[in-house]
Amino acid sequence: LSHRPRYRPVPKAELHLHIEGTLEPELAFALAERNGVTLPYATTDELRRAYSFTDLQSFLDLYYALMAVLRTEDDFCELADAYLTRAAEQGVRHAEIFFDPQAHTARGIPVAAVIEGLCRALDRSEQQYGITTQLIMCFLRDQSAESAMEVFDAAQPFLHRIAGVGLDSAEVGNPPAKFRAVYERAAAVGLRRVAHAGEEGPPSYIREALDVLGAERIDHGLRCLEDPGLVERLVRDQVPLTVCPLSNVRLRCVDTLAGHPLPRMLDAGLLVTVNSDDPAYFGGYADDNFRAVREALALDDETLRRLAANSFRAAFLDETTRAAYL
Ligand code: HPA
Ligand code: ZN
């Protein structure tokens, strides 16, 4: 009998999580079988061996290819249930979940199947998993501005299920300003706004996301460190940055976890949070990321508590709920 107390992950909010990036190989094969989709891999091990990325695009190619197995409302519900089960084990109490409707509508899957499937799982999440949730609908920045507008139109009947909009996919060459019009419409109907910026793209994309899109939170934001004036602004305005350490290593935005700029960002006074991005692909969920940075960067307990507190500060929570977490 062990008397060692069971490890308890620190309670936290997950603010940068693509639900399609939680598709584990086992579920991918099960859904492929059910939906009669043939995957170009014979086994889950063979698929896992393909998870060796050189940059964002090399990951995105596999990420979009594997989504072919997601076809029905039930599939999206199962995907979200599987994520919430793992998130609960990892101390996640609140999750703001990205989804990529264009990656599904482009394959003939109606946006209703995506949102209603996800919501079926999310609607029982607080009861079943002790996790409150919100949905953030992302536009694919490597698709046209017109395509973003079309999916925003298609999502009209479901906007009451959506807390905000985001911007993801291949960053370089697809600056935030391309999506000014659809973000203006989102703002006009009271949606929150976030955007991936400064993952592979330059610091100017972070400024543009703030100035042109009205982004309230920046996803990744790593490359702000190249622009001291921008860092000063992000610190002054306490703009949250949703950093994803394991993702950054796997997509080679940083060379090693031990060399990750997270401590420098904290020291600068930035409101940084630690998140998992695409945990099925990058080697870990929320607390896996917390434990990885604790080890690699020798973070003390106080710093880990600060990161957890930051996650609730940066979340789109009402002030009563936020206060209960802080
Ligand atoms: N960056 C951009 N697009 C994405 C990512 C990411 O880290 N994950 C899923 N889509
Ligand atoms: Zn992301």
Image: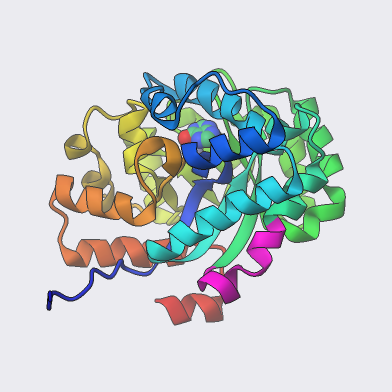
Q: Which residue is drawn at 44% across and 57% down?
A: 86
Identify which residue, 120 or 106, lies in the foreground. 120
Left or right of 170 in this view: 9: left
Rendering colour mode: rainbow
Please give the count of numbered marks on the rendered protein.
Answer: 0
- Inspect this view and state whether residue 271 appears: no
Left or right of 69 in this view: 91: left
Quadrant into which the C terminus falls:
bottom left
Q: What stretch is highlighted in magenta?
A: 119-131
Check residue 120 for magenta coloring: yes
Q: Residue at x 26, y 52 (%)?
A: 266
Left or right of 297 in this view: 147: right
- Inspect this view and state whether residue 135 appears: yes
Find residue 249 and report its horizontal and vertical position in percent: 30, 32
Left or right of 276 in this view: 108: right
Quadrant into which the N terminus falls:
bottom left
Identify which residue, 185 or 39, lies in the foreground. 39
Find residue 13 and report its horizontal and vertical position in percent: 45, 62
Q: Main secondary structure of the magenta part?
A: helix
Check residue 156 for magenta coloring: no
Identify which residue, 179 or 94, lies in the foreground. 94
Q: Residue at x 36, y 24 (%)?
A: 49
Identify which residue, 112 or 153, lies in the foreground. 112
Up the image or down, 294 lies above or below 222; here it is below
Find residue 278 and report its horizontal and vertical position in percent: 46, 40
Q: Residue at x 24, y 54 (%)?
A: 291
